[in-house]
Amino acid sequence: MRRKLAAGNWKMNGTGSSLSELDTLANLHPNAAVDILICPPATLLGQAAMQVSTSSVSIGAQDCHADTSGAHTGDISAEMVTDVGATAVILGHSERREDHNEDSELVRIKARAAHAAGLTAIICLGESEAQRDAANTLDIIAGQLAISTPDTATADNTVIAYEPIWAIGTGKVPTLVQIAEVHDFIREKLTSRFGPEIGNAIRLLYGGSVKPTNADDIFTVSNVDGALVGGASLKATDFSPIITALEGATI
Ligand code: PEP
C-alpha cells in the first residue's frame, strides 16, 4: 500500500507573512493519514522547515542545481536544501522546462544530485495541449519518464508527478479516463524498468487544476497516489479539503 501524498507548490508566491498558512495547515491536520508537503520559494525554505519541524507538514524546494557547490550564481544545491531541513525537491516542473530551457537530461542529473543529498525528487512530466491533440501524449510521457528518472530511483527517494501542461493553472482538467490512462502507463513503465517491488511502490501524483471541488473524483482514479497542487495550496483553507479528500481515498 503506497502512502498518499498531498504536495503543494507555492511557485514564486509568498513572503514571510505567508508562513502562518503552515501553522494553520498543521493545526487542521495534526495526525494526517497522508503525507503533507509544502514547497515554498527558496527564500522561505529554512524558516518554513524550522516552523513545521514538530508537525505533520514537511517542506520541499522547487528546484536544485545538479552540482554540489560552485560558481552558479542564483542557484541552490540539493545539499543546501537538505541543510535547512527540507526533505524533497520538485524537479522538471513544466514552468522550469519552459522558463529555463530545462530538458529531461538535466532533470535526471538534478534528480541524481537530490538522491545523493538524501532528498525525495518529485519528477514532473506532462504533455502540451498540441501534443495531446496530436495523440502523442503517451510517447511524450514515455520519453520524459525514461530520460528524467535516474537509475538511483527508489520508492523512498522518488515520486513521479503527471502534470499535463494545459491543465496547470488553467482550470482545465483531463477526464478521469485520461488521467487513468497516463497513470497506468507510467506504472507499467516503472515496473518494467525497476521491477515490481520498486515500480509498484513509487508514488504517482496528478497535478493540474486540482481543487477542493474535483479532488474527490481525481483520487478515485487508479494509480493516483496523491496530488501536486499549485494555486489551491497557497491557502491552508483551500488545501485542507484536498488533503481530507485524499485521506478519505485511503480508507
Ligand atoms: C502546479 O504548479 O504544479 C500546478 C499543478 O498548478 P495548479 O494546481 O495551479 O494548476
Image (tube, rainbow, N blue to C red):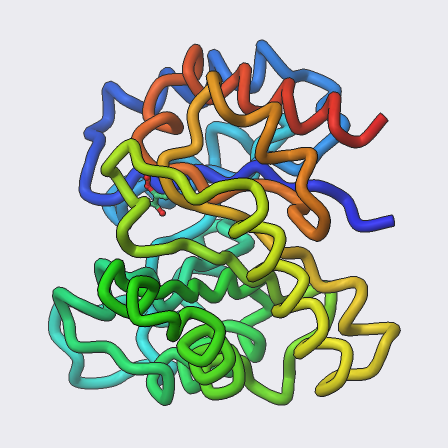
Residue 118 percent location from the top left of the image: 60, 68
Q: In the figure, 155 relative to 218: above or below?
A: below
- Residue 161, relative to residue 123: is it above or below? above
User: Which is more toward the observer, 2 or 14?
Assistant: 2
Residue 101 figure quarter: bottom left
Q: Nearer the viewer, residue 116 or 147?
A: 147
Rendered location of residue 15, percent (x, y): 19, 29
> Residue shown at 30%/71% (left/top)?
134
| Ligand 1 found in image quarter | top left
Q: Is residue 78 above or below residue 55?
A: below
Q: Name the residue located 42 percent from the left edge and 69 percent from the top edge.
A: 137
What residue is rendered at 48% in x and 18% in y?
212
Residue closest to the eye, 227 or 171: 171
Find residue 185 and report its horizontal and vertical position in percent: 63, 69
In percent of width and height, residue 8 lies at: 43, 37
Left or right relative to 224: residue 67: left
Q: Considering the image in quadrants, where does the C terminus appear? A: top right
Where is residue 150, by image quadrant?
bottom right
**Residue at point 61%, 66% (across, down):** 158
Count of labels in the image = 0
Q: Is residue 56 left or right of residue 94?
A: right
Residue found farthest to the front:
134
